[in-house]
Amino acid sequence: MSRQADRDANHALRARFDDVASQYQRLRHGLDDIQERLSRLAVTAESADGTVRATVGARGQLIDLRLDREIYRRGDPDELARTILRTVEQAVAKTTGQVQEMVGEYLPAGSAAAGFVRDGNFGNLLARQDRIMREAGDGDDR
């Protein structure tokens, strides 16, 4: 009976390893595709009144800014600055969503890396390890 239990446990471990290895291979092969798609990503947002168009790249960097001539007739530089900022923020938000979707095609939804891509929180990268260390520490107190 013990040998059967060992075989069953080994079979389960092997199946889990194969699953993890398969996920890794999928991610590894997809990295070149993601890198290429990210290098070409350009997202544009337009202000509500149509006078400002901002285009940002995959990292949220401003790569193009277009101002309609009408904007110069208003004469309020503070309002222009606010409109530009709001429009760039909209473009960045769109870009973030697209990058998350792209990367999400290759990362497991609940993974630490997916969490980091989603919210930029470095704590997500070590959350699982932190939990394991806390649990291991709790075991030492007994």
Image (cartoon, rainbow, N blue to C red):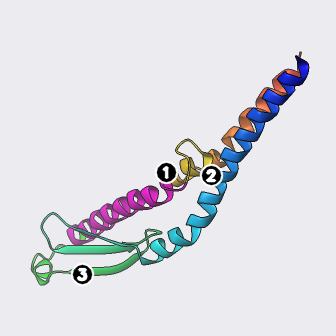
Task: Check residue 66 in the rendering and tell me which mark sits there, or answer none.
Answer: 3
Q: Few, some or many C-alpha atoms within 10 Å of disc 3 (few <14, some 14-19, many ≥20)?
A: few
Question: Of callouts 1 and 2, which one flags the residue occurring earlier in the amino acid sequence?
Answer: 2
Disc 1/disc 2 C-alpha distance (Å): 19 Å
Residue 51 position (above or below residue 110): below
- Report the front residue among 20 and 8: 8
> Which secondary structure lies at badge 2?
helix
Question: Which residue does the numbered mark 1 point to in the structure image?
Answer: 118
User: Of tags 3 and 2, which is closer to the observer?
Assistant: 2
Question: Of callouts 3 and 1, which one flags the residue occurring earlier in the amino acid sequence?
Answer: 3
Picture residue at 47% right of the left edge, 71% below the top: 38
Residue 42 position (above or below residue 142): below
> Which secondary structure lies at badge 1?
helix
Q: Few, some or many C-alpha atoms within 10 Å of disc 1 (few <14, some 14-19, many ≥20)?
A: some
User: Of tags 1 and 2, which is closer to the observer?
Assistant: 2
- In this image, 27 relative to 14: left or right? left
Residue 80 on image: x %, y %: 22, 72
Picture residue at 13% right of the left edge, 84% below the top: 69
Picture residue at 21% right of the left edge, 74% below the top: 52
> Which secondary structure lies at badge 3?
strand
Indicate the amino acid at tag 1: Arg
Look at the image and give the residue range highlighted in magenta.
Answer: 79-106
Disc 3/disc 2 C-alpha distance (Å): 42 Å
Q: Few, some or many C-alpha atoms within 10 Å of disc 2 (few <14, some 14-19, many ≥20)?
A: some
Residue 83 on image: x %, y %: 23, 67
Q: Quadrant of the N terminus?
A: top right
- Any magenta on residue 64? no
Task: Check residue 23 in the rendering and tell me which mark sits there, or answer none.
Answer: 2
- In the displayed orientation, state which residue is furthest to the bottom: 69
Residue 137 on image: x %, y %: 84, 28
- Any magenta on residue 83? yes
Residue 27 on image: x %, y %: 60, 59
